[in-house]
Amino acid sequence: MANIIIVGTQWGDEGKGKIVDCLTEKSNVVARYQGGHNAGHTVVIGGDKFILHLIPSGILHKDKQCIIGNGVVVDPLALITEIEQLKARGVPVTRDNLRVSKNAHLIMPYHVILDGWKEKVKGNKKIGTTGRGIGPCYTDKASRAGIRMLDLSWPIQFKEKLRANIDDINCMLEQIPNVDKLDTDKIYDTYISYGEKLAPYVDDTDITINEAIKQGKTILFEGAQGTLLDVDHGTYPYVTSSSATAGGAMTGLGVGPKCVDEVYGVAKAYTTRVGEGPFPSELLDNTGESLREKGAEYGATTGRARRCGWLDFVVLRHAVRVNGLTGLVITKLDILDDMEKIKVCVGYKYTDKNGERQLKDFPKELPVLEGCSPVYEEHDGWKGEASAGVRSYDKLPKKAKAYIELIEKTLGIPVVIVSTGQDRDDIIYR
Ligand code: IMP
């Protein structure tokens, strides 16, 4: 199989975990390149549900190597917990199938405190983060104050860096009511013990992955979050702090662009978003509510209800462009099974002092985006016929096939996979 990057084309939660799980069968290495335990990938195997936050879902397969790249921010306790939970359920996790980059930055307790505090002071302008400390950790990385996985093996230097950071943080914490100052020694001891537990997995993952590529092994690059949450190409500032688009795979793992054969974008058959920020095709009515209930649209990480809306071609065109998508994966087609009519957003209507116009391209200016209203096209649904559980394209209801073909025609790329249910086997390869 080819080396494939899997990216989210919307605001995350597109069902990438299941697609990665399915494509892992044909890959040797599965590598995460950005984000942290803000992600939540749900994989259902024979009725057994696994929710993974940091470890690539490839871990559920025998003889596959999983890599957590340098671009990922790692909360060591979250990683240790995930490893232990997998082991407790009989999934082996060893150095043979899991490697974590030495260069991965660590989420520290102060990142979590700052994440919560920054959200609080933003009031109604809050981002709606997952509260996992992701933004402050990437901030430290960019400002060169970060602590990396390798630091845990250099106790003297680690303590020095930690002390400098905590001195700074404690000055800031003085302004926050009801928050105790942080104790360097306590955090040091805790993190050193995390380092000992994670030591078997720590690796020069850039060397490991490039060796694998040289040996002709196939790599699956697993993106987290989605294009519209990308720090450069998303709905800034309502984004996460990493490069969730395809380009992030290169810097987040230390590989060159020539090793990538395909870039598959994963899109739900409709759209969802969790957290704050603009969402032009959002449905605030019963249709939105029924998508949420039928699609079980509640976050795998925070349990928050996801906002739901129609499929948005303005968003998807942007995703095709900035990721260089070569194929699309449509998930949760079955959730539309009961719909009499299905709408798709084909453009945005925007009015300013020059009058009304229709935008075909995703606007970058937040005030413009916030002022846009969706222009819909309505299509017949396939109510009364089911796509749920269908495993061959020919057996899909005619109107469901027409929906898939409309997506292909509009975006100019093939739909290579369709997912028709939660289970690993509810899938159509085209
Ligand atoms: P953060 O990544 O926790 O800083 O959150 C920033 C924004 O990204 C918020 O709107 C979150 O809800 C959103 N977000 C982060 N991770 C995910 C994810 O895995 N799925 C969907 N939304 C996410």
Image (tube, grey):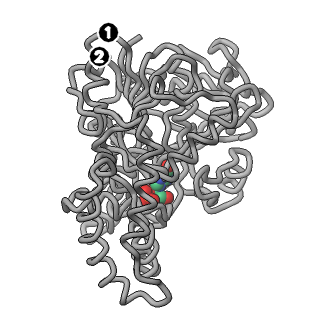
Q: CA distance from mark 1 to mark 2?
A: 5 Å
Give the position of the N terminus as an image quadrant. Answer: top left
Residue type at the position of mark 2? Ile
- Which of the two residues, 104 or 327, is positioned nearer the viewer here? 104
Kindly identify the residue that appears in the image at 31 percent across and 47 percent down: 153
Outermost residue, right direction? 384
Give the left or right position of residue 61, taking residue 390 as reference. left
The mark total stands at: 2
Relative to 355, say whether 194 is above or below.
above
Give the left or right position of residue 82, taking residue 30 as reference. right
List the residue tagged with mark 2: 213
Relative to 408, say whether 361 is above or below.
below
Instruction: Estimate the x, y position of residue 113 in percent, counting from the top left.
Output: 44, 72
Kindly identify the residue that appears in the image at 41 percent across and 27 percent down: 264
Instruction: Estimate the x, y position of residue 75 in percent, counting from the top left.
Output: 45, 53
Give the left or right position of residue 274, taking residue 143 as reference. right
Give the left or right position of residue 132, taking residue 402 as reference. left
Res 414 seen here? yes
Determine the image quadrant of residue 161.
bottom left
Determine the image quadrant of residue 200.
top left
Instruction: Estimate the x, y position of residue 172 in percent, counting from the top left.
Output: 32, 83
List the residue tagged with mark 1: 216
- Which of the two residues, 10 or 63, is positioned nearer the viewer here? 63
Instruction: Estimate the x, y position of residue 198 in percent, counting from the top left.
Output: 44, 42
Q: Secondary structure at mark 2?
A: helix
Kindly identify the residue that appears in the image at 65 percent across and 24 percent down: 424
Q: Residues within 10 Å of mark 2 (few under 14, many from 20)?
A: some
Contact check, label 1 and label 2, Cβ < 8 Å = yes
Kindly identify the residue that appears in the image at 71 percent across and 31 percent down: 382
